[in-house]
Structures are given as C-alpha cells and as structure tokens.
Amino acid sequence: MSRTITVIPGDGIGPEVTGAVLRILEAADADLEYDRRTAGIGAVASHGNPLPQETIDSIEVNGVALKGPLTTPSGSGFRSINVAIRKHFDLFANVRPVRTMLPGGRYEDIDLVLIRENTEGLYVGVEHFIGMDRDPKAAAESVMITTRYGSERIVRFAFDYAVANGRHKVTLAHKANILKHTQGLFLEVGKRMAERYADRVAFEDRIIDATAMYLVLDPYRFDVLVMENMFGDILSDLMAGLVGGLGFAPAGNIGEGHAVFEAVHGSAPDIAGQGVANPTGLLLSGCMLLDHVGQAEVAARVRRAVSTVIGDGSARTHDMGGTHGTAAFTDAVIGALA
Ligand code: NAI
Ligand code: MG
C-alpha cells in the first residue's frame, strides 16, 4: 500500500527543489502519495501563520514529512519554525549522513554519519542577562541541560542506527574533561550503552576539539558520530565542508512517531526563482525518507542515479561548477535511473 507523506515546499528555492525531487521520486516509482501543506513566509501570506495548524495536523497523521527550507519571518513571535516543528513532534535525533558525491574535492569516498541530539544542551535557550551597577548587560548566563533520559535515547539511537545500517563504530564526542556534570553524564550514559552493543558495534569516546581536528586530518577513522546539540550543529557543517559544502547535505529529524526530512541548506533567497538551485540536498533527504518508510531499493536507485550524474559530470548545477539549471539536472538524474 502506498504511503502518504506530508510535503512542505517551503520558501525561496524550496518550491523549485521540491518540484525537482518529486519529479525524480515519481520517475523512480516511489510508492508515495503527497499531502501538500504550507509553512514559512508563504503560509504567513495564505494563513496568517508561519506554521498553520493544518500543517501540524498533516504531519501528525502521516508521521513523515519532506520539508523544503523555511525563511523564518523576522520580527515575528517565532524563534524558528524549524525549531517549533522539532519541539512539537519531539524529533530528538538529527541524522546527517555525509558522503562524497562530487569527485576531486579535499577527500574521496567520505562516508560518515553524524547523529546530533536535537532537544537539549545549550540550545534549550535558558539564558538571561545579569545587570550590575548601571549596565543591564554586565553579564550573561546560559544553562546547558543534559538529562539521562535524553542522553540514553540519543546514544541508543546512534547504536541502533549503526546496527541497522551495517556500520562498525560509534564515536561519542564530548567535553567531559571540562563540563564534568553535563558532558560527564552524557559520556557516562554512552559508555554504559556501549556495553550492550559491544558484540556488534565498536565504541570510542573522544574530546570534541580533538574530534574536530581528526575529522579534518583523517576523516576515515570515523564512522558514526554522536554528540550533544551545539557540538553537533558545529561539526555537521564542518563535515559537510569535507564533501564540498551544504549543497549535498541531507538531514532527517527523527522522533518516536514522526520524522521530518529536509536539506541542510536554507531558502537561498539570492538565487530563488532563477531555476538554478541544486536539488541534491533535498533529493538525498527524500532517499532517507524512502529508507525510513521501507522503500530502500527505490532510495538506492535514486542515489545511484544522482551519484552517476554528478560523478561523470554529465550534468552539474552552478554551485558544483557546472552550467545546468535545476530542470536540466533533474532531467539528467531521471535519465540515469536504471
Ligand atoms: P542558505 O543555505 O539559504 O544559503 C547559503 C548560500 O548557499 C547562498 O549563497 C545560497 O545561494 C547557496 N545555496 C543554498 N542552497 C543551495 C542550493 N540548493 N543550490 C545552490 N546554492 C545553494 O543560508 P542563508 O542564506 O544563511 O539562509 C537563508 C534563509 O534560509 C534564512 O531565512 C534562514 O533562516 C533559512 N534557513 C532555513 C533552514 C531550514 O529551513 N532548514 C536552514 C538554514 C537556513
Ligand atoms: Mg546549523
């Protein structure tokens, strides 16, 4: 039976890359039905709300969404619509696979997965200024929250992901030498969880700053990496840089009952409406979605096609140093579907 997913085209280049991705998924015979909903700037115009209730309801019912980038309207009450969606559905795991697509970069054959905790850490936003004398901003304070519950579920997720995807090692990156309580708890939970998987997946822990250095010097020593929210935010962009930048980076925000897949890049207002955007990030996010709903063969076929097209240079978009627009690139990927 075909699976219905929520599709949110989003803002800026969102509708262009979403259109391209849906064309490719259709050509690849993905067994999906699309429930199109709106969010972002477009939704402010049509619904007076950047995150309409009907969009939330649709994700609630379908359980799975493919989302284009959203421009968060400045000056509105929303901190970020993306954060609001992650919070609403408790999408605690941010999964970011990083693979070489464009040959000739800094490294060949990179194949890493970063799993970032998505709900705790410094990004809970518990912070304030402290006034002294006549300076209302004499100091500022931010609270890092780490719970055993949150640490256990993200580390377990990382190990389960490794097992399910035939990965051999999980690296837990941390700063427990300095942040002895928050990061110490995260590390303690990780070590204990590792024992349960010891027969199937290797485990190591590594200080976050050294991890950053080794990722640049010798990324091949890593496989699956798991870390708290802000560290994951920073290192996932570093890792995207290893394979040529954000244009190829997909992501899944995964919770117990819901999952939202999106490209890592934003709405790219500077090139919106020009037909030149690279749809690869959202396309690979669509492949993650297909894996998630049990259509892994379709996902593998799409990945092979896009990898062939980018690899042999038969079509490349401007950001890859090519001359093809979104439509021509999309046609080439469809042509390469075996
Ligand atoms: P951005 O990722 O939209 O753009 C950065 C640069 O990369 C720009 O030069 C852009 O043209 C280029 N670029 C991005 N995606 C591309 C693609 N698919 N093909 C070719 N070139 C591409 O980041 P920026 O400019 O900081 O943010 C723009 C808006 O997007 C902001 O409103 C921001 O809040 C939002 N944003 C939304 C995200 C989401 O919905 N998940 C994530 C990041 C940003
Ligand atoms: Mg980030």
Image (cartoon, rainbow, N blue to C red):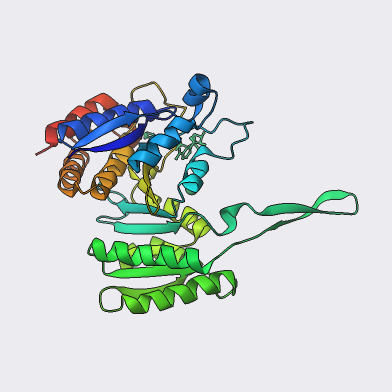
Q: Is residue 249 left or right of residue 151?
A: left
Residue 115 position, x and y percent, is 39, 58
Height in image: 65 above or below 15?
Answer: below
In the image, 210 versus 190, the foreground residue is: 190
82, 46: nearer the viewer: 46
Task: Give the left or right position of residue 186, taking residue 108 as reference.
Answer: right
Is 294 placed left or right of 135 in the picture? Answer: left
Q: How many marks?
A: 0
Q: Is residue 187 left or right of residue 328?
A: right
Is residue 133 at all visible to an observer of this figure?
Answer: yes
Query: To which quarter of the image does residue 110 belong?
Result: bottom left
Residue 218 is at least partly visible in this image: no
> Residue 196: horizontal and vertical position, in percent?
33, 77
Q: Quadrant of the C terminus?
A: top left
Q: Nearer the viewer, residue 57 or 332?
A: 57
Q: Quadrant of residue 38?
A: top left
Horizontal and vertical percent position of residue 183: 54, 70
In the displayed structure, 150 sits above or below 133; it is below
Image point (48%, 41%), residue name = 82
Residue under the image location 39 percent in, 29 percent down: 37
For image coordinates 51% across by 44% down, the residue present is: 83
